[in-house]
Image: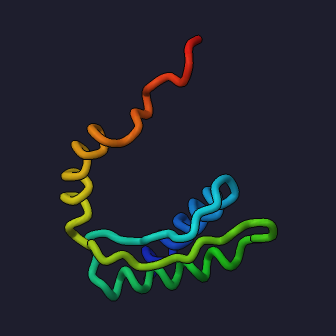
Amino acid sequence: EEWIGIVAKELAQAIVSAASIIDFEHVIIDGGLPVEVREKIVAATRAEVSRYDLRGLQVPEILPGTVGHLARALGAASLPLFDKYLIDRNARLGTA
């Protein structure tokens, strides 16, 4: 329970910080955790986010993920697709 509280507090800070810069609809919390632990983290994170002054922010909905322990493998498998078909983040826009 103590670890979940620490995780939730840090996730809430990251979510509110990101939401102050970019409007996004959802935050997905996932990982190689037992479902009940993930659910507790989601609930605790929602509670921590609600403690912030959220005036002027579009607060994203915080949801549990469904990928679980396969997240790393799926993410790694997607890297070649990203490299081939998505915009190169290192490309320069225009000439200097």
Which residue is drawn at the image coordinates 61% and 57% (left, top)?
Answer: 18
Q: Quadrant of the C terminus?
A: top right
Which residue is drawn at the image coordinates 46% and 78% (left, top)?
Answer: 63
**Quick one: 94 or 26, which is closer to the camera?**
94
Q: Position of residue 76 (x, y in %)?
A: 22, 51
Quarter-wise, where is residue 54 in the image?
A: bottom right
List the single residue furthest toward the bottom: 36
Q: Quadrant of the N terminus?
A: bottom left
State the colouring used for the structure image.
rainbow
Which residue is drawn at the image coordinates 27% and 82% (left, top)?
Answer: 34
**Quick one: 85 or 68, which is closer to the camera?**
85
**How many marks are shown on the rendered structure?**
0
Which residue is drawn at the image coordinates 22% and 70% (left, top)?
Answer: 69
List the single residue furthest toward the top: 96
Q: Is residue 67 left or right of residue 90?
A: left
Q: Is residue 13 left or right of residue 70?
A: right
Q: Position of residue 37 (x, y in %)?
A: 35, 83
Please tell me whether residue 27 is drawn above or below residue 42 in the rendered image.
above
Quarter-wise, where is residue 47 in the image?
A: bottom right
Q: Position of residue 62 (x, y in %)?
A: 52, 76
Please tell me whether residue 72 is drawn above or below residue 96 in the rendered image.
below
Q: Position of residue 19 (x, y in %)?
A: 64, 61
